[in-house]
Amino acid sequence: MALHGDVLSSTVNGVLIEVNAQALGVILGVPATGFDLYVREDKSLLSRDRLLELSQHLSQQPGLRSPQAVKKGDMQPLHQLLFWFIIKNIIPRAQGRNQADSMDQCLIDLMDKEQQINLPAFMINHIMRIATTPRAHDLGYGFLLTKVFEHFGVELRKRVDAQVIDEVGSSTIMGCDFTLLKPGDRRTDQGAQTPSMPAPDRGGDQGVQTPSVPAPAIAPIPRPS
């Protein structure tokens, strides 16, 4: 696997795959526009003042004097839920799920402000980082990468049925410090309010729905000189 400029290339089961963010976006049916700075390794991509602002805001500690990781439990419930979505879908990982680093904080803030995130660009950079780290990590993006492999005609020997679920389970909501209210429930406390959400019709932590779209044909990407 190699990254030349913005083109990721890899050979899978004898098939050469080459994509940049624009091509990957076409295959997946998602826009390749918006914020695309992968600041996990290079914090200098964002100014120190911006990193400090994020840490102060998300930790609810305006007196912080230097940027730092923010514990999930120190965040507001909504930010906890956005963090959960990020580590499940945008930067998937099995470790470091209780602390938001600089990149997590930036993505939480973008989602909170409803600003566009360039998912294809993040996928390319995150896949490259996972592939080159000395430690063993799951690659993530399983369902999305299946669409890429099928687009390029890679033979897949083992298939696992994917579940398409369009809800966040009650255990996730409660784990983010929300209070679930069932129909007819009434809040009685007058102190500091914990955000409340309607209880889902069915429980479970099944993630979010991933849209299924056909993989259209795309023009080959010229190899970098």
Image: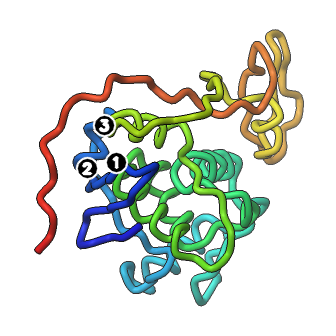
Amino acid of disc 1: Gln
Q: Mark 2: which amino acid? A: Thr
Point 62% across, 26% down: residue: 162
Which tag, 2 or 1, sits closer to the chain's start? 2
Where in the figure is residue 55, as x and y percent of width and height?
59, 73
Between label 2 and label 3, give the one nearer the viewer: 3
Q: Residue at x 36, y 49 (%)?
A: 15
- For residue 142, side relative to residue 223 (left or right): right
How far across and how far down the image is residue 158, in percent?
A: 62, 33
What residue sits right under mark 2 in the picture? 33
Residue pictured at 41% horizontal, 39% vertical: 154
201 is higher (above) or lower (below) than 41: above
Circles 2 and 1: CB atoms closer than 8 Å:
yes
Outermost right residue: 188
Q: Nearer the viewer, mark 3 or mark 1?
A: 3
Q: Which residue is mark 3?
A: 27
Write down the residue under mark 1: 116
Disc with the residue nearer the chain's start (3 vs 1): 3
